[in-house]
Amino acid sequence: MKYLILNQNTDNYGDDIAAQALAHIIRSVDTKSQIRFLYGPRAWSGTVPVLGTEISHRVMGGMGGKTAYIDLARTYLKRKLGIKPKYKNVEFDALSNDLDWCDHVLVSPSGANIGIYQDWNALKVALQVAIHGKTLIFHLNTVGKSGNRAFDLLARFALSRSMVFVREARCLEELKTWGLHSRFGPDSAFALPAPQPTTYTQEIIGLVPTGLNWHPDHQSNKSLFIVDQLDDGFIKRFTANENLVLHIIPHLYGHLDERTLLEKIRTALIEKGMPAERTVIADWVQSSDEYDIAIASCHVVITMRYHGVILAAKNGVPFYAISYESKMNEACRYTRMESYCVDVKNSSSDRLNVGLDRLLSEHGRISIQLRKTAEQLGKMTHFPIYQAVFLGPEGG
């Protein structure tokens, strides 16, 4: 069968991992699958690392402004009356051809484009799928209300004609207030096996930071927030124990590269007293596979990124999460690590040090627990494809 995957992002190792996981799931249940990834209209440095003769990629153009709704009406007339549309925007024609080509159309596992990120282009794509007459499958996404009345009205229309699988219980409740049924599952990345970690003679504390000012709820946040959280108590661990090394692990690359931020974090930590030779930016991470390996090779991970939580849990690495959004809280809950998760607004250096003490003292038990949980979660990630492809909306 042929699968069209919409709204794929890249230049972000977490999004790349999500694409790899979804392709892995599809291939595992349909060995003759053909998969086409469609990327949104922004500058990309390349395509996700999912390769094969059965894989294709296309970067979409923008769906236009207000004229897009006229084109959506043309799609409706084509479906109802058989009138061949003359689209104002050529992307509607290209997307129609893609929809005619595929047997199933999915939204790639991603953040709240239909929600607080308020991505109008992604919404227009979803509307085109619904009006075209295809069932859109949201594969373990974050989906919900944006707070914009017009956006939410259109989103509700598209979602009511879709099969929606979400990765947050919060989304289930929010969609229920719209009268919409959805199903819950863990992040798609749990479908991927743990990689073989790199062996180090020293113990690696992994740090996956973010500046946070990219997020709608945290645009006033200091870019070096994480430096304030790593205080004298944290630094004394390293000065007192030469067996510890801090790896600052990059999460973004290419067009979104955050090297400047990582260098500022490293410099600021060294100025606070961290040993320079043991405070390292993991610049050998050049792909999502190497990102996965870098996290799997850590003794403990401190993460401000959602996929830092997911990959640490998947790989059985104890972690401490500073959460910027409910999806991080949810992931910590279903991996049974909620006591090692703190909201960014309530985070403090004292809380981080206490959490790190507990992680280190209970490391073996936590690692075993995470591996057992990850194995169970991995099985759950296949349900949306089995449900949507083999059972259909009314089955199961």
Image (tube, rainbow, N blue to C red):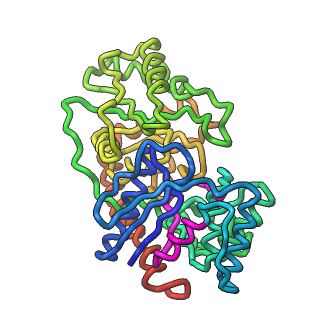
Q: Quadrant of the N terminus?
A: bottom left
Q: Is residue 309 visible?
A: no
Residue 26 is a magenta residue: no
Q: Residue at x 35, y 49 (%)?
A: 366
Image quarter of residue 285: top left
At which x and y percent is residue 55? 35, 63
Q: 236 left or right of 112?
A: left
Q: 271 left or right of 125?
A: left
Q: Residue at x 70, y 65 (%)?
A: 155
Q: 210 or 156: nearer the eye?
A: 156
Q: 156 left or right of 194?
A: right
At which x and y percent is residue 324? 59, 42
Image quarter of residue 359: top left
Residue 97 is a magenta residue: yes
At which x and y percent is residue 341? 52, 44
At which x and y percent is residue 139? 50, 67
Q: Residue at x 59, y 67 (%)?
A: 93
- The magenta stretch spans which residues? 93-115
Image quarter of residue 330: bottom right
Q: Is residue 70 visible?
A: yes
